[in-house]
Amino acid sequence: GRQTGVPLYRLMTTLQSERAVTAAWWSGMPVSSAELRDRRADTDRAVAVFLKSSDADQLHSDRAKDRLRDVARRLADLGALRERANARHGSPDDAVDYYTDVIGGTIRCFGDFNHVDDGGLTQEATSLVALFSAAEVVAREDAILALSGPSGKLTSARFREFVEAVGASDYLYDTVALDLPLDDQDALQRILTSNAWQTKSRIENAIVSEHRDVSSGVVLPPDVRDWRAAYGTFSGQLDTLDESELKELLAHADERAAQLEDQVVLLVAASGAALLLVVAVVAFTTRTVLRRLRSLHDRTVAVAEETLPDVLDRLQRGEAVGSDALPRPEGEQDEVGRISDAFARVVAVSVEGHRKLADERQGFSVFASGIAARTGNLVSRQLALTEHIQDTYGQDEALLADLMRSDQLTVGMRRQIENLLILAGGEISDPHMEPMRIADLLREAAAEVEDFRRIDRHAMDETSVEAGVISQLSHLLAELLDNATRFSPPTARVAIRSELVGDGLCIEIEDRGPRVTAERYEEMNGRLHSAPPYSELASNAHRLGLFVVGHLADQLGATVTLRRSAFGGTSAVVIVPSEHLVPAREGTAVPEPAKEPAPVPRPAQPTEERRPKLVARQQTGDPAGDPAPGAPELPRRPRKERVRQAGNTAPETPPRSGSGDVPGRPALPERVPQTHIAQRLREPRADEPVGRDAATPEEVADAWADYEDSTRQVELELRGDQS
């Protein structure tokens, strides 16, 4: 209050005086330049003291800090306003409004200083702010009347402002008189009953009742000439009263601060005594607690260094561990007892975790053994079939059909190895470099299944899958298709359909398998949506397909749901997110037509079954790796990691062994064109209408693949009849 409030009050009174003189000088009243300079000099001194002594950071309220900084910021424009007033640029009303805004800001600062935790001081500060506000209203009346000038004329807006100020001043002084102390009330009553104040009231009443409205504003009565003398008398008395109220407030604040200091001393003394008592209690309690903690420490060290390592070693060896070997909670209610019980529970949880870990290790061992056994079985079947082809068929045409069967077994073996990699936390490699059409992806997934001929594919929409997820999605669909074919009757068809939905791409696989209960579906869907521990894998080592599908779905962000189909079998619904899809025409490679006439396709591996082309094994320098001289060479599959051209659905022409590269090696049998073709295909084709074919490259590729499939099935049936 002393550092900021007193300079702020001085600034307020000097601004009020300069406002009145500036308004009178601008309006042409008889005001000397010396008087104007004196008022400005007083204001400059008050501004300098205020800016030097006030410190907004010492205020406790952010709002008070902002008010004080706003007053200092507005004072920076005082010099520019004075220059405009000297040159009489602008409007005198703007100058008066500037002073009024700054003075109002100072009064609001006093109002923000009142927020202290003392009712008496707050009441006194509120009364002081009311006195300042009332004095400012009267001072604003003086400035408004000074604007009337020698002509005694005001604008209508200024006249309304004067009338409002008259009513506000009467109300404020009547209200504030009730809250002041008795001595201050008497001083205020002496001012309000003085001759000067009576003259003020008379002039106000005359202005309100005797003014004349003209077109340019309001003409004031002649009584206005007596205002300056009366205001000069009672304004000084009001300033004296306000300043004394401010000093009394600061004095009371000093007294209250002294009382608070005494209270602080008493509180410090009482706190010191209480602290000594607390220290004594703490010393006694600490000895007891330390004794019990030492005992707890000894027991804890014994468990951590002896009991727990022994228990863990027994668990690693697969031995059973009973609860007698571990510490037990004793249910004590004090803090040390609770810590002991908590440690016992921690040990129990740790042992239980290691027990589960040991179970999971055992489960993983069984799981890996199961995968290895299944893969070894497939490899054995593949080797046996290869030996059978070499020993039995030799140069027989049926070699190609057996090769197809052998190839299917190889694909199954590779998929089982990939299952092991997926469940072990690895990722399968993806050799694709370009997006793949969903129709091609369905064919690729179906080709992974041994009974691929029982699978009907239906791609409802033309879209493509991005290259980075083709192998994962194909493997996921292959696992579902494999389950569908294995659990359906041998003659039943399995349908796979795909179409675009709101959440992405929906792929549905429907079989004709046995009826499954709702509880069983719930259990299987649970496997699809949660990664199981190795202990659970151990108990389901013969049913790992759903676990693999669940892992792949998590990696793709896809959802897989099993439910009962309308035909009584099982329907698997896969929702692939839209982020893995690309427009079909952007990601589809259109196959180029053959430049030379190709022979009729042989019964080799169809491209829509995701079978890599078979190539002849090259001669090497290793005698163990080369076939026996004179024996027909077996075709082999290129490595899966090699990138295959996306969208290449043209049939492969088998390599000819009789080209002369290896003398003495018999050539593979060739088909005679039009020999095994169906009767309806031998009929001459009708002339097609001349015109541009509207089929897209994708539709041409699908039609060619369907044609190959039909031709191959007819040839296999005819070969079976001949044999």
Image: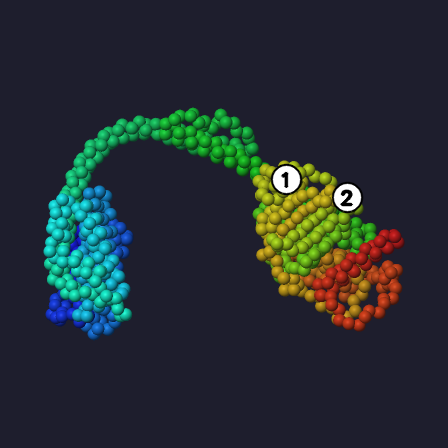
Position of 509 compared to 551: left or right?
Answer: right
Binning the other alpha carbons within 10 Å of mark 1 as few (below 14), some (14 to 19) or many (20 upward) gives some
Examine the image and state in which quarter residue 649 appears: bottom right
Give coordinates of residue 237: x percent, y percent. 12, 55
What numbered label is drawn on residue 662?
none
What numbered label is drawn on residue 522?
1
Disc 2 vs disc 1: Cβ atoms closer than 8 Å?
Answer: no
Between label 2 and label 1, give the one nearer the viewer: 1
Query: Sequence-wise, which precedes: disc 2 or disc 1?
Result: 2
Distance Cα–Cα, label 2 vs label 1: 24 Å
What numbered label is drawn on residue 489?
2
Q: Residue at x 54, y 37 (%)?
A: 357
Q: How many marks?
A: 2
Q: Is residue 422 visible?
A: no
Position of 546 compared to 229: left or right?
Answer: right
Give coordinates of residue 197: x percent, y percent. 14, 56
- For badge 2, the amino acid type reads Pro
